[in-house]
Amino acid sequence: MPAPDPATDGAAELDGAPRERKQYTTFVAEREIAAPRSVAFAATCDLIAEATGGPVVAGDPEPHGLGARFEFSVGDPTYGRLNLSEEVISFEPPWRRVYELSGAPVALYQGTTAFTDRGETCLMAWSVVVNPLPDGASEGFLALVQPFLDNFADQVRTRAEVNHSTN
């Protein structure tokens, strides 16, 4: 009988030790936007720059591309003020932007904003996968994620639709 493959069996042993199965938490905000995806993608980048004061490290291509880093702070009910850093790990305008967030009380936070053409409109899907800390240490922060995504997605839709209607 062949040995279990850790790549396909999440409970298989890796280096002789059982592998712990991760319990990821996901959040999704989707918005139908009455504008082309290029306009919605640009609105997303503009709003991120406005909310953070712009990148502290420019990406490639400048300013929002691969490696760009944005810093900002948010209030957390458990930890107080959190200083966060968002680094762009994939940048494919006007289709997709992927980033990792550090400084949050989580083991992993990775977000993807994707835009799909729908004729004269587009669909924005913003998804976040989080690996929470054990023993509920991330709960206060996690309670903020969905409302934040929903609010920011609404701002992107409004900005993109206004920009599209005035051009």
Image: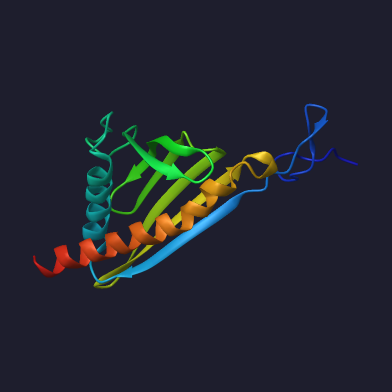
Q: Position of residue 41 (x, y in %)?
A: 27, 54
Q: Is residue 7 left or right of residue 143?
A: right
At horizontal 23% and vertical 38% (from top left) the residue drawn is 53
Q: Between residues 96 and 27, which one lies in front from this camera angle? A: 27
Q: Is residue 122 left or right of residue 147?
A: left
Query: In the picture shown, does residue 140 fall above or below 71?
Result: below
Name the quarter where the C terminus is drawn: bottom left
Would you say residue 39 is visible in this rendering?
A: yes
Q: Position of residue 66 (x, y in %)?
A: 33, 35
Name which quarter of the figure residue 159 lies in: bottom left
Query: In the picture shown, does residue 63 fall above or below 98?
Result: above
At horizontal 26% and vertical 48% (from top left) the residue drawn is 45
Q: Position of residue 117 (x, y in %)?
A: 31, 66
Name the quarter where the N terminus is drawn: top right
Q: Residue furthest right?
A: 1
Q: Is residue 134 left or right of residue 85?
A: right
Q: Is residue 99 left or right of residue 1?
A: left
Would you say residue 115 is visible in this rendering?
A: no
